[in-house]
Image (cartoon, coloured by chain):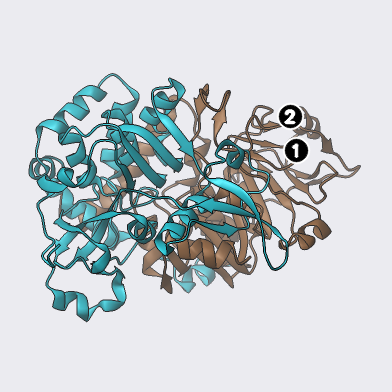
Amino acid sequence: MSAEKCIELEALPELVGDGDAVAFGGGWFANHPMAAVRELIRAGRRDLHAMTVVGSVDIDLLTGAGVLGHLTFSMVTLEAFGLAPNVRRGIEGGSLAFTELTGLGLLIGLEAQGRGVPFLPYRGPFGSDLPGRYPDVYATVDCPFTGEELTAVRAITPDVAIVHALRADAEGNAQWDGTSGPDVEMAKAAARVIVTCEEVVPRDTIVESAHMTKLPGFYVDAVIAAPFGAHPTSHIPAYGMDAWELMEYAIAAAGEGYEGYVKRLRRESEDEYRHRVLGNRRGDVLRALVGQAETLSASAASGAAAP
Amino acid sequence: VNGTYDVHELMVCRVAAEVDEGVVVMGSFTPLAYAAYMLAKLTHAQDAYLVGFDAVGMEPIRLSFTGAEAAAYKGAACRWGMLTEINSIHLSNHGGVEAVSSAQLDGTGAINLSAIGDFDRPKVRLPGGAGAAEVIKMYRKMVAYFADHNPRTLVERVGFVTGTRWKVGREARRAAGLQPGPIVIVTNLAVLQKDFDERPFRVVSVHPGVDLGEVVERTGFELEVPDDVAPTPEPSERQLALLREEIDPLGTVKFDFVGGQERLAYLKGILDAEWERAAASVGVS
């Protein structure tokens, strides 16, 4: 592949085949590659095996849109907005095959693949019922030096990782300034890596802030400019999470109106999506959430509220 | 509870009392736990080392649903990712305290965040444990909190073990290479603590106005009830002022205590306030 890795978002689904195992980056309500999620839905991808550490609206939307054949996760939740309705329905109804791994196990399995070893040992989830469910992922191994019994977690091998960065250059050198979650480990483990980012910048910009480069370009196959590409989740420091859209999502996903919600996403391009949801300066307000966020200075400890 | 404070405020103070020096891992935004860490950091535990999202070495923050993450980074000394956090904090035994909540917790200290009913075809599919399966055994103290103390949540045996403390007693924990420390449960009724594998949770205190019999009745596992059970300390004026004026003026903690129809409206009210403030700052009406 040439050093020029920039492609359009519309070309992303060509890099993801039906049935592929796809690791989706981000965690909590932060930094999920939502523009990519929407584009996979628009392209009608089917039977993907999604992998997430702490998924939220990304995974629930993929499930509800019929994109997933299998889900590997350690948590999927809409937090204050409740359990993930589509994931719940899929698993409770038996239509969504799943593998529930422990959070550290999932990350260590990705790390193993990134290091090129077939497994890694750790002081695992002793006493948990989960490892026994998945003998193809977890086993017990004795330390060759001390004899201590450890948990071995098998290398996890995504076909594709999709992560959302703050910025990247055409070579794929990608930077984060806030929550990067599992993004780097997913990218190192995957056979193909797609980086969507708030903006594509010249190499000089990357070099000037090289300490922020968490993923060097040699890992990366494609770079896609996707402004507000994590919306409605956050991308700190660019914008906070769109809790109002997330609430709308949660209400739609729990009720009758959900088909319409997905249909509308399928019909519109990502540009049209941005125009619809971020119009009337909504994007400015989401950016302002970052500015409004407050730490409590030492004065709070000694201030108005004296003992 | 009496007119000077609400039970969620007492719970925040009681969880905060468990926070001491050392690393506190907060994970995602869980308002009651966050409020307790901030209160501790602003009062008795100024050396607590806070980690929220991937922000490491945080200053205390003001709580909001849409601002907590950004605020965490604003005052942080270091920015990591999930794997570095687990390798450097959890697996190397640096984790001090984390307050967790779960759908079920039992008399052994095991938690269920996976499924109610059959695991493969559950009645209720729960969110999953994230790192809890591994880390609740690794923390020096495991603190669990529940807004509604009832026998369906505090059960004799969980239906599925997502994670456990594994070893509880001091010597057993030391022998297993784990930091010694108890399991502490803080609910809307009482504080329970488990110090030994082979002995049940003990009632440490009941909240003012709560009947001890009610605590026993509403707990699904066996409890050790000492002859003298003290009342849980009430929040001080200073703690209440910090909580209400500095840490959580929007009332995010109370959200977990609002049920039924009012729940969504309560959340909307907070989010409206967050929107209005951000919008005003950029001149959007």
Q: Which chain is depicted brown? A: B
In the image, what residue occupies the spot 29% across and 65% down? A176
Tag 1: amino acid? Gly
Q: Chain of mark 1?
A: B
Q: Chain of mark 2?
A: B
Relative image position of residue A206 (x, y in whole percent): 20, 75
**Which of the two residues, B278 or A185, is positioned nearer the viewer here?**
A185
In the image, what residue occupies the spot 60% across and 46% down? B4
Badge 1 marks a residue whose secondary structure is: loop
Left or right of A29? Residue B15 is right
Marks counted in the figure total 2
Relative image position of residue B43 (x, y in whole percent): 59, 67
In the image, what residue occupies the spot 10% across and 55% down? A7
What residue sits right under mark 1 in the picture?
B107
Relative image position of residue B87 (x, y in whole percent): 53, 64
The residue positioned farthest toward the bottom in the image shown: A208
Q: Which chain is depicted cyan? A: A
Left or right of B15? Residue A169 is left
Q: Contact (CB < 8 A) between labels 2 and 1? A: yes
Q: Which disc is residue B189 wearing?
A: none
**In what quadrant of the picture does the N terminus of chain B appear?**
top right
Q: Residues within 10 Å of mark 1 (few under 14, many from 20)?
A: many
Tag 2: amino acid? Gly
What residue sits right under mark 2 in the picture?
B220
Which numbered disc, 2 or 1, marks the residue closer to the eye?
1
Write down the quadrant of residue A168 in the picture: bottom left
Distance between mark 2 and mark 1 Cα atoms:
8 Å
